[in-house]
Image (cartoon, rainbow, N blue to C red):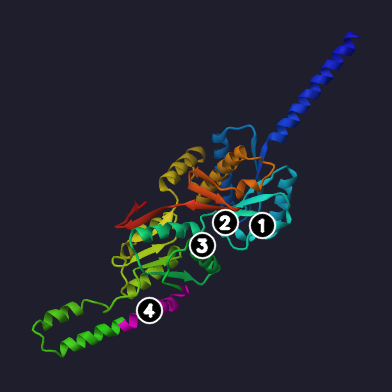
Amino acid sequence: MFKFFKILVLLLLNFLCLVSIVQSSENKIRIGLLVPLTGENSEMGYQIVKSTRIALKEINSNNLEIYPRDTGSDPNKTLRSALELKNLGAKIIIGPVFYKNLQYLEEIQDLIFVSLTNKTINLPKNVISSGVNASSQLNTIKKFIELNNIEKTIFLTPKLDYENEIKKAIKKSKINIHKHYLYDKEPTKLTAQIEKITNYKIRKQNLLDEIRRVEDSNLADKENQLEKLKKRYTLGNVNFDSVIISDFDESLKSVITSLLYTDVSPQKKFIITFNQWFDKSLLRENAIQPIYYPSINKKNLEDFEKKFFQEFEEYPNYLSLLSYDLVGLIYYLSLRNEFDDIEKLFKKKNSFKGKIGIFNIKDNKINHQLNLYQVQDGKLKEIF
């Protein structure tokens, strides 16, 4: 009888232990991570994985688990990996990184993807774009324009695949644009287009005509006037106070150089561009300064880079900081909402302060409150 009772007690304890394990497993927050772990972007993918490991370590919760899976640069591979994550019990996925990898994800029910892309047009219904998008940047630029009482702004956008994204962001931000021009990135065509936008040939001819008029005159200070005129490149003003250029890297420098060629100086007109991620090469280009651009909080980025380096002896890419913040964001939202109703997490209006800055979440969209920076005299300065 005693042996039977003992066996019964052991069976009961094992059952209770099993129930406890099942309940604990059910309470876990499983986050999938879709990043390129093979192919040419694998280094980026592994840095993103490392950043989520730092986030997990700092959150220090037994209820949070992250499962990385490979996307390569292949939408089909992304779909297979997403299905695998769903079978593991994940309901929310950080990633994929690239817009093209979103192609088949709408086929998967009951999964939300918080992609690192900054594109917001034609997204699948179950994808939230979390990158630093054009609307976030234009909201910051709009604030700068208003603070400086800038009245006429022209917008220059290269003829690339994101021009519709820019047009949508201009409309959404309600920024006051005088004219929006699309330009060709091929240097010869670009220069000709900038000449036309700035009325360069007319202004150049105005100068030649004025020199000829003074030369033919009997003015008392004729020589002084001629000396001053011959130091100039054009005569007459352009019909704008500032230029917003939605371009990057060497292409951006080419546009600003073309503006300089047409006698539009950054010393006289505001040259504003999109997020340059603190490109150090701009600091060395004194001729094209000052330049203004929105970006994430630089001090927070530097703190994260230091932390990442101490942990892994390498410096992270910028998407690593974003993915680090997204782990914290998802965990924070899960504490405030029923995680089973995943769509509620991104439909309610929320604000979240992360290392990248402040996120505003509303209607399945993430926007960022950005800082604005000035590059001048080889130095970077935070304006606000």
Residue 319 in view in this figure: yes
User: Label 2 to label 3, Cα distance in Å?
Assistant: 18 Å
**Residue beneath disc 4:** 195
Q: Please name the predominant secondary structure of the magenta segment in the image.
A: helix
Does the magenta-highlighted stretch encompass residue 353?
no
User: Label 4 to label 2, Cα distance in Å?
Assistant: 34 Å
Extreme-left residue of the structure? 220
Question: Image check: 231 left or right of 333?
Answer: left
Q: Secondary structure at mark 2?
A: loop
The amino acid at mark 4 is Glu
Q: Are marks 4 and 3 in contact (CB under 8 Å)?
A: no
Q: Secondary structure at mark 4?
A: helix
Of callouts 1 and 3, the N-terminal one: 1
Q: Secondary structure at mark 3?
A: helix
**Residue beneath disc 1:** 125
**Residue beneath disc 3:** 172
- Horizontal and vertical percent position of residue 34: 64, 50
Of callouts 4 and 3, the N-terminal one: 3
Question: Image check: 104 left or right of 142?
Answer: right
User: Disc 1 or disc 3, which is closer to the eye?
Assistant: 3
Q: Secondary structure at mark 1?
A: loop
User: Label 4 to label 3, Cα distance in Å?
Assistant: 30 Å
Of callouts 2 and 3, the N-terminal one: 2
Quarter of the figure that contains the N terminus: top right
Q: Tell me which residue sits at (19%, 88%) in the image.
A: 213
Q: Are marks 4 and 2 in contact (CB under 8 Å)?
A: no
Q: Tell me which residue sits at (60%, 57%) in the image.
A: 98
